Image (spheres, grey):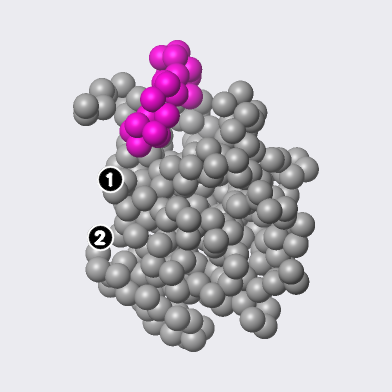
Amino acid sequence: MSFCSTLSVVIRTYNSSKTFSRLLSRLRPESGDEIIIVDSGSTDSTRHIAHQYSLPFISLKPPFHYSTSLNAGFSRARAPWVVVISSHCIPLGYDLIQLFRAFIKNADSKSVVGYGKVGVVPPKADDPDAIGNRLAFESGRFSPGGNSLAIYRKSAWEAHQFDEGIDTAEDLEWFLWAIGQGFTAHFIPGVSAIYLNQGSLAHMFRKGWLEVRQTRALIPFSRKKKFSIVFGLVVNYAYYPLLVLRLKIPFSTMFRQCAHSLGAFLAEFFPLKP
């Protein structure tokens, strides 16, 4: 079977005009590649920006939903591998698509998902390709990445689409299915982006809350010790102000990330519904 190097890129948007153009300007698709925009009812200039780049634009009814928007984009994608990148993530370089292409060229038949790294400051240099399977995950040697920056084998998605019955953590649910089937996941060296979520403080708090509660539901025995949970919050609340003092991030990013951390912290202590 010959190697197909073309890629589909799915970008989920919702009132993303503050970061959308910056993301698109850093993508360098080649002939045969495609970029698909899945929008969930934007009322700003997001649609106009997509039209400026002559990009396919799928309009969904609000509210934004992680799994629904991803499944809509994957259904439209033509390539055997699909890149997922959030509209608030800005690649560090201009070679993001080429790095993903290099990954799939060397991927074996068991490899179904590859992750990049995102952070409010440039992520540290990656170690050599980290491989995750069920044993590595259960032993704590591999933690999956997220759908802010990832690539999926479309045939695996066709076997198991993203779960539209959960609010968030669809990436974790899919990863758990994949390793349960004997597939492997990877972190791809060099694939990284800056995280510039422009959501409100309420949105960021709710995001942290839902992510942790859904993670607890998916991995029932993942509860951490209370000391480590409190310590993590303290570290975050010291780390983000330090980044502001060092002029690495603006105050707005600090407040958003602190709201996210608080939501995640509180979600660890409230019991889940039966």
- Residue type at mark 2? Pro
Percent across and percent down for residue 170 are 41, 47
Query: Quick one: 153 or 242, which is closer to the camera?
Result: 153
Q: Which mark is residue 82?
A: none
The C terminus lies in which quarter of the figure? top left
Query: Which mark is nearer the camera, 2 or 1?
Result: 2
Q: Residue furthest left?
A: 274
Give the residue pinned by disc 1: 202
For residue 143, side relative to residue 46 (left or right):
right
Give the residue pinned by disc 2: 63
- Give the Cα separation between the discs numbered 2 and 1: 15 Å
Q: Residue furthest front?
A: 1
For residue 54, side relative to residue 206 (left or right):
right
Q: Which residues are magenta?
A: 213-232
The N terminus lies in which quarter of the figure? bottom right
Percent across and percent down for residue 220 are 39, 25
Residue that appears at 38% across and 39% down:
211
